[in-house]
Image (cartoon, coloured by chain):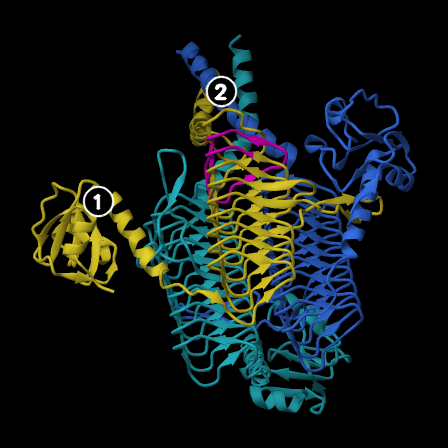
Chain colours: A yellow, B blue, C cyan
């Protein structure tokens, strides 16, 4: 598929310089620009490339001076990053329009299950009994949807993702490959003989709308009630969410973080990668938790930023690290004082 | 399915107050009580709910006074938690009796494989050649059981779990979705040219009886011999167990912990989440390792509790943290002394 | 399959003592030696076993004295470890020659896809459209290979691994069960209303030759361009590689490590388990990063070894830990000085 500089400039309402008929087929980072691709510069750090990059089409701001005869066409806009994002979306829509449709065989749809229009069901995908699926849902090969699950409109379940029985997934969600939703929570009661007795896990997992869940992330079902991931939450890869956890609206969690049972995370919280959070605590709205932190107590103050294990305010944490480095000097000063006192 | 207060009271040997014919269909946490559900109070922290919760049936101790007209029926027992656990189990048994049976098609059973009565084999599940499967085993869709694997009675293998060739799984185990058992251990010999040569991994994984393994956890096969997970072990989600590790009876390990090659973990050890343990060491019986610890040396003392990275006794660890906070005061006192000495 | 001491001695060019007709069927660690197996001793730490182990065949160095009537045959070579590795490889080749061949049914091969000779395609495996597969490729049950993927000669894709559309995998690779290659990078732009807008992830993942990827590891596709894992890289289990990361030739990464977006790792870097590396930094060739470290800045010096979080040189890190332990003594000395000064 080809797009000319003229077409793209018109689409973005940009000012065109150079060859209006120059055509590109893809998008490339400015560091990897080539004449068959459109590249953009929004960050001043990359402006140097404007003079050297062999770009097919260069999308830039209104005032950046360019003297580079390897650029075939320039499109100038007010906000190059916003314009670029618009382009990316259009590109993706064009790509999406070519997506597979229909129900591939063999696949399994259990008794009493129903689905809206526009379903893509890949070969070897399994839909249990009494499942309810909205319109325009895409379920890739070898995905497993347990009995009684509900999936909202426009949601995509990638290859080999598994949703245990009874769980509910909202609209416009993307569940990546290998995700497991609704496995048993880790609940065992110690017995007198040193063995453990399983506490039945009878609850479900409830995923809101516009949630994205990264590959191989795991969300356990509740003991009773529901483990809840609310609207707009974004989870990266290989995250662990234990039973009865609640994650508030638009919270973002980076890869390999783990949240223990019954902890309640507020709205618009940002959690870095490899963070550990103990069970049965509360994290207030807007809190920011730095990567690799260990959070062992509730954080009640909205918007607070913490780091370290045990997690504390950034300033306190880095002061502690700086103080450790002062110890050799303190030792010297004490020795000096002792010498003077004889 | 409906249960009346009269039936449940009889079942638990409890004393009934209120409407004996009030019926419920499910169980709910006391904070989420509603008139269609049974809720219980065992922990004094929750006793306040007894006066306000709109519970269908309220299961409580013998002496808790309740004045709450939104509760339809009360069942009083000596030990509400034990009674509740009994109920949970009965509930699960009733649910389980409705489970799917038989062999769904298409599925694959290789040459020479045999299985006992009561097998459930989901669609798209794959059983290799010469596999031995006990009675009442449940293997969910898209699970992979390699050649020569053995699976004991009453074991459940959830959707998309994979067991490589030759591995052995005991009785009464639950292997959750996405678990991988028996992938190659991470063994590579460095060569003079900077590349690495794979060390063939010829051993297996042996899982005992009554083991539960959480979603997407990974247990590598041994280089030679076996990686061993003994009876009653409970593993949470996303755990890494390397080649030739041994995990002793009834040890419990929380999510995202990793154990490096050839380390031997004793019996009834409790390991928190996100712990890292180096290879080739030994952890004695009954040791407790706190979340996010890094264990770099053997722990020889039974029952010892450690924390931190490198892990040490709790007291020592928290003393170290407290001491760091004293440094500014020490600095002040030294400055004062220096001033006084001129 | 049986091998006699005579045959093995001839194969290895070793000197034979004892019964040349004694036959074994397997290999065992010296601690687990039995008469049906060959065991070896290369490390002096294990030489004590030479006098006690009931080995069928004992493979040892030229000078180790053995007086042990439970050993049936001894084979002496110059370098027992090298000889043993040779044996392991032969053993694996013999085992491999018995591997499954052909295309099991049902499986799915999409339009326009082609493959070389020697393909093994397991039941329920899915090959999308326009996929290109080299010779002697092995794809196990329930694996998912998206549209337009390329897979080089002699590569093995284990059960349930998933490769999203457009990604490229080189020759002689081993991709273990549950691996996910090419899921969307974690890119979301914050909007004014507190929600996040997905940044389309249009790039791919490129895996070089001779790469091994451990079970349930995840490698995200680039936003644009490619996430690159170069020749000879070895990745352990449950690793997270974010979008646009580059991992250089022959770098080795242990389990549960996470690398954030756009970071570039050099050649022959060694990274321990549970390490976290922030995004947009550079790690020089030959760097060594200790387990559980947190790397927050570029490491520019080749071959540097770091540990801790934030990561620093080993010496500095351990000095800091040692200094903390000196604080109580410093407190005592200051108190003493204060007392003397009245």
Q: Is residue C104 above or below residue A257?
A: below
The residue at 22%/63% (across/down) is: A2
Residue B288 magenta-drawn?
no
| Separation (CA) of disc 2 from disc 1 | 55 Å
Q: Nearer the viewer, residue A227 or B73?
A: B73
Label 1 packing within 10 angstroms: few (<14), some (14-19), many (20+): many
- Residue C328: give x, y in percent of width and height: 57, 26
- Residue C82: give x, y in percent of width and height: 53, 77
Which chain does tag 1 point to?
Answer: A
Q: Main secondary structure of the magenta part?
A: loop
Q: Nearer the viewer, residue B155 or B270?
A: B155
Q: Nearer the viewer, mark 2 or mark 1?
A: 1
Secondary structure at badge 1 equals helix
Secondary structure at badge 2 equals helix
| Left or right of C146 on screen, residue B156 | right
Disc number at residue C178? none
- Residue C231: give x, y in percent of width and height: 38, 68
The residue at 57%/88% (across/down) is: C11
Q: Nearer the viewer, residue C59 or C98?
A: C98
Residue A289 magenta-drawn?
yes
- Residue A195: give x, y in percent of width and height: 80, 49
Query: From this viewpoint, is residue B331 visible?
Result: yes
Question: What residue sits right under mark 1 in the picture?
Answer: A80
Label 2 packing within 10 angstroms: few (<14), some (14-19), many (20+): some
Magenta segment boundaries in residue numbering: A265-291
Q: Is residue C310 above or below residue B220?
A: above
| Left or right of A53 on screen, residue A307 | right
Question: What residue sits right under mark 2 in the picture?
Answer: B330
């Amino acid at each position: 598929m080809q797009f000319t500089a003229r077409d793209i400039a018109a689409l973005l309402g940009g000012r065109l310089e150079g060859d209006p008929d120059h055509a590109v087929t893809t998008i490339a980072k400015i560091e990897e620009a080539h004449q068959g691709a459109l590249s953009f510069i929004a960050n001043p750090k990359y402006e140097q490339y404007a003079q050297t990059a062999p770009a097919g089409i260069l999308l830039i701001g209104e005032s950046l001076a360019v003297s580079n005869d390897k650029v075939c066409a320039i499109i100038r806009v007010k906000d190059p990053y916003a314009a670029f994002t618009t382009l990316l979306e259009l590109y993706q829509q064009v790509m999406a329009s070519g997506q597979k449709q229909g129900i591939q065989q063999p696949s399994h749809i259990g008794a009493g299950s129903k689905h809206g229009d526009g379903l893509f069901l890949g070969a070897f995908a399994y839909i249990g009994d009494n499942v309810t699926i909205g319109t325009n849902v895409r379920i890739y090969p070898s995905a497993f949807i347990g009995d009684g699950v509900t999936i909202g409109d426009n949601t995509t379940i990638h290859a080999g993702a598994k949703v245990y029985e009874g769980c509910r997934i909202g609209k416009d969600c993307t569940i990546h490959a290998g995700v497991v939703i609704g496995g048993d929570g880790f609940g065992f009661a110690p017995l007198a003989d040193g063995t453990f007795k399983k506490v039945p896990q009878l609850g479900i997992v409830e995923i809101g709308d516009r949630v994205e869940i990264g590959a191989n992330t795991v969300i356990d079902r509740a003991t009773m009630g529901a483990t809840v991931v609310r609207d707009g939450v974004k989870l990266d890869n290989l995250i662990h969410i234990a039973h009865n956890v609640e994650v508030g609206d638009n919270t973002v969690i980076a890869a390999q973080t783990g949240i223990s049972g019954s902890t309640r995370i507020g709205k618009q919280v940002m959690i870095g990668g490899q963070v550990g959070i103990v069970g049965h605590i509360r994290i207030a709205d807007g809190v920011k938790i730095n990567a690799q932190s260990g959070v062992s107590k509730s954080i009640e103050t909205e918007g607070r930023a913490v780091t370290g294990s045990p997690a504390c305010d950034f300033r306190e944490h880095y002061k502690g690290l700086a103080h450790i480095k002062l110890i050799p000097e303190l030792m010297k000063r004490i020795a000096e004082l002792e010498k003077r006192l004889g």
